[in-house]
């Protein structure tokens, strides 16, 4: 198959390089729902060709990539669209998995908060989680600086820190986000068993 030269000159278009359009070049940006999907349409003015072109994107969940519709679309508090299944609640606001990890706490933070809340010292927590002491200690310092826990040791010689209201809220969100991950659910199982053995021995 051959192209006619006149067609070829327009393909790819001269301004094909898909750089982000400058703000003033976006003549109009609309965001609307259709029954099937959440579509985002924007009209971009191309000063070189003196034309306006229209771009339509279908809204998809930033985590599972499912096409979003009106009933199944949430705005992550930290930015981005997600579906209801991929949303976790933090202070009553929807948050996606990625932002739970980056803005609320990662799995090690969740393990340390769970351990402190169950009054498990760091040696026992190392055995239950398989995470080295220095990594657990670093997470504890991080959680203290984020005001998720009060100052204190980590069992044995020092008294236990306490979870602050913010720490409790963070842990609740992290637990719902990570509870279906095999490593985290195994840790929670071991923690539960450890606690029941501990309380039976008392
Ligand atoms: Zn999703
Ligand atoms: Zn997010």
Image: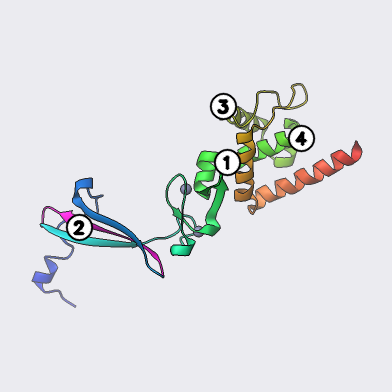
Which callout, 3 or 2, points to the residue nearer the camera? 3
- Measure how far apart labels 4 and 2 are at the Cα level: 59 Å
Q: Quadrant of the N terminus?
A: bottom left
Q: What residue is pinned by disc 3?
A: 145
Q: What residue is pinned by disc 4?
A: 124
Residue sitting at the far right = 201
Residue 174 position (above or below residue 42): above
Q: In the image, residue 82 lies at what x, y percent?
A: 47, 55
Q: In the image, 3: left or right of 141?
A: left
Mark found first going from the N terminus, 4 or 2: 2
Q: Is residue 38 one of those drawn in magenta?
A: yes
Q: Quadrant of the C terminus?
A: top right
- Measure how far apart labels 1 and 4 are at the Cα level: 20 Å
Q: What residue is pinned by disc 2?
A: 16
The prevailing secondary structure element of the residues shown in magenta is strand
Mark found first going from the N terminus, 3 or 4: 4
Mark found first going from the N terminus, 1 or 4: 1
- Measure how far apart labels 3 and 2 are at the Cα level: 48 Å
Mark found first going from the N terminus, 3 or 1: 1
- Which residue does the image show at 72% across and 31% down from the upper left? 122
Q: In the image, residue 10 lies at what x, y percent?
A: 13, 65
Residue 154 position (above or below residue 33): above
Residue 116 position (above or below residue 46): above
| Labels 3 & 1 near each other (Cβ < 8 A) | no
Q: In the image, 136: left or right of 11?
A: right
- Which residue does the image show at 23% across and 46% down from the upper left? 23
Which callout, 3 or 1, points to the residue nearer the camera? 3
Residue sitting at the far bottom = 1
Q: What residue is pinned by disc 1?
A: 106
- Which residue does the image show at 81% across and 42% down from the upper left? 194
């Amino acid at each position: 198959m051959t192209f006619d030269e006149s067609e070829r000159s327009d393909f790819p278009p001269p301004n094909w390089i898909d750089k982000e359009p400058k703000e003033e070049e976006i003549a109009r940006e609309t965001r609307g729902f259709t029954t099937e999907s959440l579509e985002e349409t924007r009209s971009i003015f191309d000063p070189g060709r003196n034309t306006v072109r229209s771009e339509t994107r279908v809204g998809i969940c930033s985590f599972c990539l499912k096409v979003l519709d009106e009933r199944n679309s949430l705005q992550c508090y930290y930015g981005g669209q997600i579906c209801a299944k991929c949303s976790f609640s933090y202070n009553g606001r929807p948050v996606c998995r990625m932002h739970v990890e980056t803005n609320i706490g990662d799995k090690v933070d969740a393990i340390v908060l769970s351990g402190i809340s169950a009054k498990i010292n760091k040696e026992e927590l190392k055995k239950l989680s398989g995470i080295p002491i220095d990594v657990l200690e670093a997470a504890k310092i991080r959680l203290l600086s984020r005001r998720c826990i009060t100052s204190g040791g980590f069992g044995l010689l020092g008294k236990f820190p306490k979870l602050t209201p913010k720490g409790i809220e963070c842990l609740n969100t992290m637990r719902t986000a990570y509870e279906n991950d095999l490593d985290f659910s195994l840790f929670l199982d071991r923690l539960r068993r450890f606690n029941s053995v501990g309380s039976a021995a008392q």
